[in-house]
Image: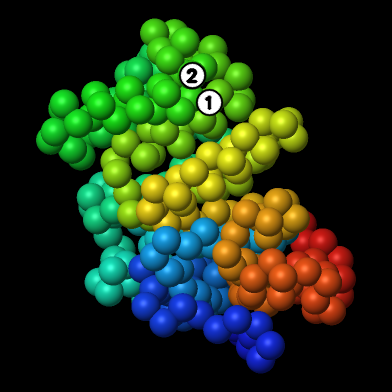
Amino acid sequence: MQHPVPSEITSPVSTPLLRIDGLTVRYGRITALDRLSLTVGEGEVVSIVGPNGAGKSSLLGAIAGLVRPAGGDIAFRGENIVGQPLEQTVRRGIALVLEGRHVFSGLTVRENLRLGATIRRDPREVEADIRSFFDIFPILLERRNEPAGRLSGGEQQMLVIARALLSRPALLMLDEPSLGLAPKITDRIYEIIRDIRATGVTVLVVEQNADRALKAADRTYVLNGGCVRLTGTAAELAGHPEFEAAYFGLSGRRSA
């Protein structure tokens, strides 16, 4: 059952780009999301934090069209997108960067980037965008003709973010972007997220690292057991007496 949000925590934005109401996702007898509701306002960075098994990736998968919900509504720009295939979701303006840096290892860096623009019909603008990403990520320019599989983990993360942005999304969703990366590289990834937000792209980021997510986001949802346990700004959640219990579960123990 969805837990009520404490009254002192910030209320959802009034005109959201993304609105989710009562979302339920099941895998057989396992309930991954249980009547979850949240909002993401246009131009915000919103983070979803929680332990492994909290339902974070299932949430992004349902929004993107990779997972079929058992119930609930997902509205993007006021239109229902439940059950839409991934390609249609991308055409509507939503891009997802999956956990694990899924590059096409046998293709070059440039070829990987071009795959991000397959829905577009403006080749000159695509090339201009690729050049702009080479300015932002000089290492990708340096290695543009090398197979993507030869890049380091941090370089691959930069590549998949740039590739997702080549679809020119209104909403960019990132699943555990710092996973397995050194702290210095993680700092760079979150600098990139701030830069993305500054261009007007809305960002929804899933993280297990709560401290990192809180610092980067306008608002954060704490997810555990498929339910929103707490939500608010970094200032509201910092030192909140219920934060640890919300993150680790009512018993205070980390979920498996």
In the rendered image, which residue does mark 2 sit on? 138
- Answer whether residue 23 is visible to the viewer in this image: no
Pointers 1 and 2 in contact (CB under 8 A)? no
Nearer-the-camera pick, 152 or 197: 197
Q: Residue furthest bottom?
A: 7
Nearer-the-camera pick, 81 or 5: 5
Mark sitting on residue 156: 1
Q: Residue furthest left?
A: 121
Where is residue 66 drawn, in percent x and y? 39, 53
Nearer-the-camera pick, 211 or 218: 218
Q: CA distance from mark 1 to mark 2?
A: 13 Å
The answer to whether 215 appears left or right of 60 in the picture is: right
The answer to whether 208 appears left or right of 88 in the picture is: right
Instruction: Categorize mark 2 by other alpha carbons within 10 Å: few (<14), some (14-19), many (20+).
Output: few
Where is residue 15 drawn, in percent x and y? 37, 78
Looking at the rendered structure, the kind of residue marked 1 is: Gln
Looking at the rendered structure, the kind of residue marked 2 is: Pro
Where is residue 21 drawn, in percent x and y? 43, 79
